[in-house]
Amino acid sequence: MSAVNKKGISAMPARDSRKAPRWNGVVEELLEFFVQFEEVAEDCKLDDAEKAKVVVRYTEKEIGRFWKSLPGYDEKDYVQRT
């Protein structure tokens, strides 16, 4: 199966890939991060639950832990989290 046809979380780029969206905690860059994340997630055909689960992969570990503590994470409600 080619990368073009791959979909789902397994199709998302590795955290250290040059194709991966990244957010380093700079507030002014957060919107751009979500734009990049949405583009990659749409290419991989992620649904909202999958987006909510995987978005923390592309943040610093402390930020990811904080986002996991927010309402909506356990429910995998991506829209509530963004």
Image: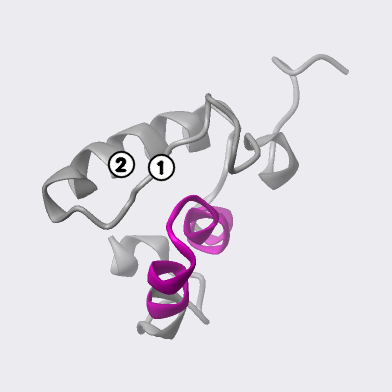
In the rendered structure, are the residues bearing label 1 and label 2 in contact, judged by CB atoms less than 8 Å apart?
Answer: yes
- Residue 25 is situated, as x and y percent measured from the top left of the image, at 27, 57
Position of 71 with respect to 41 (left or right) is: left
- Magenta residues, start to end: 49-66
Identity of the residue furthest to the right in this view: 1
Circle on res. 33: 2
- In this orientation, which residue lies closer to the viewer: 27 or 75? 27
Q: Main secondary structure of the magenta part?
A: helix
Q: Earlier in the sequence, mark 1 or mark 2?
A: 1
Compared to 75, does 61 lie above or below? above
Color encoding of the figure: one colour
Q: Which mark is residue 22?
A: 1
Q: Amino acid at mark 1?
A: Arg
Determine whether, in the image, residue 76 is placed left or right of residue 69: right
Q: Residues within 10 Å of mark 1 (few under 14, many from 20)?
A: many
Give coordinates of residue 32: x percent, y percent: 23, 37
